[in-house]
Amino acid sequence: MEATMSKADARRLKKLKLKAAKRDQYKRFTRTKSGNFFYTFFLILFGMFSVLPMYYCIITSFKPLDELLVFPPRFYVISPTVESYLTLPSLLDNLAVPLSRYAFNSIFVSVVATFLHVMVGSAAAYVLAKTNIPGKKIIFTIVQMSLLYNSYTLEIPRYIIYANMGIFDTYWAYILPAIPSSMGVFLMKQFMDTNIPDALIEAAKIDGAGSFRTFWSIAMPNVKPAWLTLTLFSFRDLWAAAPGSTIFSEELKTLPFAASTIAQSGIARQGCAMAVTVIMMIPPILVYLVTQSSVTQTMSSSGIK
Amino acid sequence: MTTANKEPVNLVIKRKEKFSNNAVYYLMLAPFFVLFFLFTVLPVISSVILSFFDFDAVSFPRFAGVDNYLRMFVHDDVFPKALSNTLVLAIVTGPLGFLIAFMLAWMVNEFGPGVRTLLSFMFYAPALAGNVYFIWQILFSGDAYGYINSTLLSFGLIVEPIQWLRNPSYALPIICIVQLWMSMGVTFLSNISGLQNVNPELYEAGAIDGVKNRWHELWYITIPSMKSILMFGVVMQIQSAFSIAAVPQALCGYPSINNSTDTLVALITDVGTARYEMGYAAAISVILFIMMFATKNLLGKLVNLAGR
């Protein structure tokens, strides 16, 4: 990459790096070395404990049959094998429709619903955070209150509403209910409250930007960490969501359903179940890495310099 | 041209602008609000109404007045235990879980971008891995081979294996620990992004103006700059702390021995799913909601006091 850069670019990069280094100068006054050391030590210890289940799933998926039967289960593997993964294709015969269909459903539903949720939720949050329309306070209070109501008791009324809308057994039954999640609106509203100065919106208006334009090209870039994080939350939940009582057709079911079918069959059940779990983990991890690495790398820049 | 006769014209334009602006704003709010009303507000309202009825999900609801509410406190043996378990769990895991999620996010934020991404990945791993509390089942297994039991036995600290998850005096504390360990989810990551959004110029200005160490900085700059994100964390934490059910159900079963780890949400699910008493389940939900809402209002006032 370095080679393809022009000299001017290289100079600019160096300047940027210097600026970034200067930025952290204040830390010389407010941080101590022993403190830094303690933090690192503590975080690594705690972090290792946190990855334990994920580590255990991965390790177990590579265990041969005899090691799977050892009790209590070991946290290491002596002779790792990919046997569990290799038996997975033969278990696919237990599925009613080809695996690709489940995979398509999962990807389609997760991506479309996440996109719509983030868009619709952010637009609503912008209106609640940065405008003075009548009724916004009440709406926001209701949004917050709804987060505290037990969702199990809402299932029957929701079921009746789905039935009346005629969205049973369609993709809409996955997508529509996922769009108006109050958590997303709440998160975006809180970020917009703090991170979008009113002066910035005023300036955009004076420059002739319309309301939607201001939201899209002024507000949203300023809360990038928030909607990246929301994308992750939404994708993670939708990816793991097994089809509920609203989906009957096999062609419309998602991967978690197929995964549980596979996990329940085969000789080395536990190994296969873990292999499936590990494979199912990959997409959320990828989304995590893509969104969070750009969250943690944004040099927090407020719009006003 | 004096300002006096310029003003009315301006006002008229402003009003017109305001009107068309508001129309656009309502339009931006509409997709969310319509769906939110359909899938959340309507169900909540019908659930609250249902709490005054007897409803078995099959026959037509029969009006029952406040019977469902009376029954909770007078005729139900499980409800008081579930209520006290829920409160204990909420009081222990709520504030502690919030503190852990915030402090760890803050500590992680001290590092450079690469280490930061890696560390937050490690902390968020349980949420990415899915139903992860099975690991605790392995650790706290009741026989002599369970990791905790075998360790304690080999050191001679206990003589015979302890039934960790069946013994009422150990079960609830263990649930607390597992729940705390699982608290690194939504709140943690929203804190991470919240910390990213704090303007670094404030820290520089703080260092010049006499902020001496990171604790000062935390109290006078970081916390005040992310109050609204902290409020988000408070609400999410209340929601999860009062709604604990999956972990005790998976580790100790439902009903647990002496109802020692049964919670309100577990009770609601049981009443609704196994006994088909939807009206009663709704009434318990309403009581649970009132407790959470009161807690939220109380804590909202506390968050506003920080950094003064």
Image: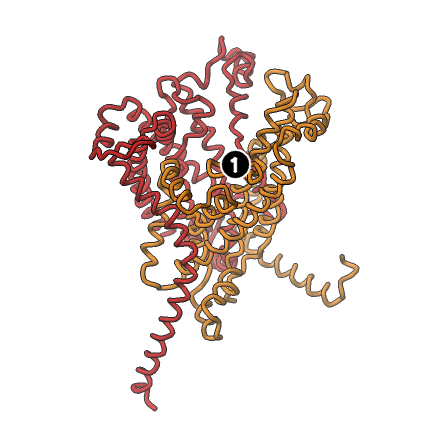
Indicate whether B225 appears above or below A77.
below
| Quarter-of-image position of residue A55 | top right
Shown colour of chain A? orange
Residue labelled with disc 1: A242
Position in image of residue B239 (x %, y %)? 39, 39
Residue B208 vs residue A144, the one in the foreground: A144
Q: Name the element at disc 1.
A: loop
Position in image of residue B218 (x %, y %)? 46, 49
- Horizontally, residue B70 falls left or right of residue B303, namely left
Please name the residue shown 49% across and 9% down the image.
B160
* Residue type pointed to by label 1: Ala
Indicate whether A62 appears above or below A113.
above
- Horizontally, residue A223 falls left or right of residue A65, namely left
Quadrant of the snapshot with the N terminus of chain B: bottom left
Q: Report in which chain the residue with disc 1 lies.
A: A
* Mark 1 closeness class: few <14, some 14–19, many ≥20 residues within 10 Å: some
- Horizontally, residue B69 falls left or right of residue B101, namely left
Please name the residue shown 24% across and 33% down the image.
B62
| Quarter-of-image position of residue A138 | bottom left
Shown colour of chain B? red
Position in image of residue B274 (x %, y %)? 37, 25
Please name the residue shown 49% across and 60% down the image.
B205
| Quarter-of-image position of residue A299 | bottom right
Please name the residue shown 44% across and 64% down the image.
A197
Residue A271 seen anywhere in this rendered image of the structure: yes
- Horizontally, residue A163 falls left or right of residue B124, namely left
